[in-house]
Amino acid sequence: MAINLGHIGRRNETVSQNEPNLLNLNKNDILDLTKKNPGLKQVVLGAGWDVATNGQDFDLDIAAFLLNSQNKVENIPQDVIFFNNMAGQGILLEGDNRTGFGEGDDERIQIDLTQIESYVQKILFIVTIHEAHLKRQTFGMVENSYIRLLDVEHQEKEICRFNLRENGSTATSVIFAELYRQGSEWQFKALGEGKIADLNGLLRLYI
């Protein structure tokens, strides 16, 4: 899974009717993360998906771009967290699930908000399909994909969740969400923006 990194309006938050204590975000919803969770320091961003019904395995990869105040990746590859660069200051990709089998989150990124470098103003979370073009796979063929934020210090209590609905989509990658600074606070925004690009292609948008 090598990758060549060298070349390259607010809406109201909604609550699920089925689970009244679970905060389900819609596209473009913004959560005042640290204001609503005082003292929050460590979070996990978990991503999950189900394998396709046609029997093919889908190798989805989660990644994070650490962006400066100009919305650019300042240092490559240090500010790109992915399967070949899994750790940075205050951020860690736990592993690489290549099939989507198993219960719970398929891939997770740990974030210590107190340790993120001061020049990093935004953390962009991306999910790509590995070798999507070769395998002719798109997010329209992936089932039940989601991301969620967990509070590490409270037994990984779920803070919020964003379910991706990409029926019929031809996208091979999705800019799922972003964590960004608002003064001394952190906010979380659900995006769900599909792209026909691999990780290198997405990175070119931010350099």
Image: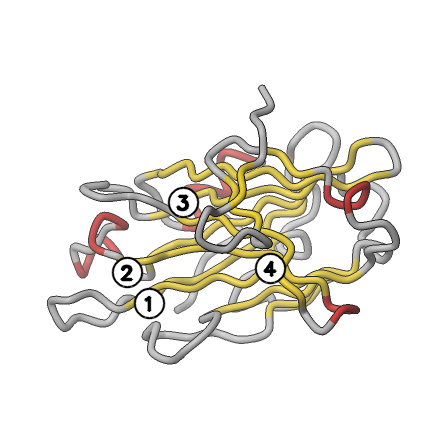
User: Pointers 4 and 3 in contact (CB under 8 A)?
Assistant: no
Q: Which mark is residue 45?
A: 4
Circles 4 and 2, Cβ within 8 Å, touching? The answer is: no
The image quadrant where one finds the N terminus is: bottom left
Cα separation between marks 4 and 2: 23 Å
Report if the CB atoms under discs 1 and 3 are less than 8 Å apart.
no
Label 3, on which residue? 174
Q: Which residue is mark 2?
A: 131
- x%, y% of residue 104? 46, 73
Q: Image point 56% across, 67% down: which residue? A: 108
Dots 2, 3 in contact, CB < 8 A: no
Q: How is the image coloured?
A: secondary structure
Task: Mark 2 and mark 1 in contact? Answer it, CB < 8 Å.
Answer: yes
Give the mark toward the camera: 2 or 1: 1
Query: Marks 4 and 2: which is nearer the front?
Result: 4
Mark 2 or mark 3, whichever is nearer to me: 3
At 30% from the left edge and 40% from the top edge, which residue is drawn?
Answer: 196
- Quadrant in the picture for residue 97: bottom left
Mark 2 and mark 1: span between their CA atoms? 8 Å
- Residue 194 in percent (x, y) is at 36, 38
Mark 2 and mark 3 lie on one chain; the one further toward the N terminus is 2
Q: CA distance from mark 4 to mark 3?
A: 15 Å
Q: Is residue 103 above or below residue 126?
A: below
Q: Mark 4 or mark 2, which has the lower sequence index? A: 4
Q: Nearer the viewer, residue 119 or 17?
A: 17
Q: Residues within 10 Å of mark 4 (few under 14, many from 20)?
A: many
Amino acid of disc 2 = Glu
Q: Secondary structure at mark 1?
A: loop
Amino acid at pointer 1: Asp
Count how many numbered circles sit on residues in the image.
4
Alpha-carbon distance for marks 1 and 3? Answer: 14 Å
Q: Residue 127: give its label.
A: none
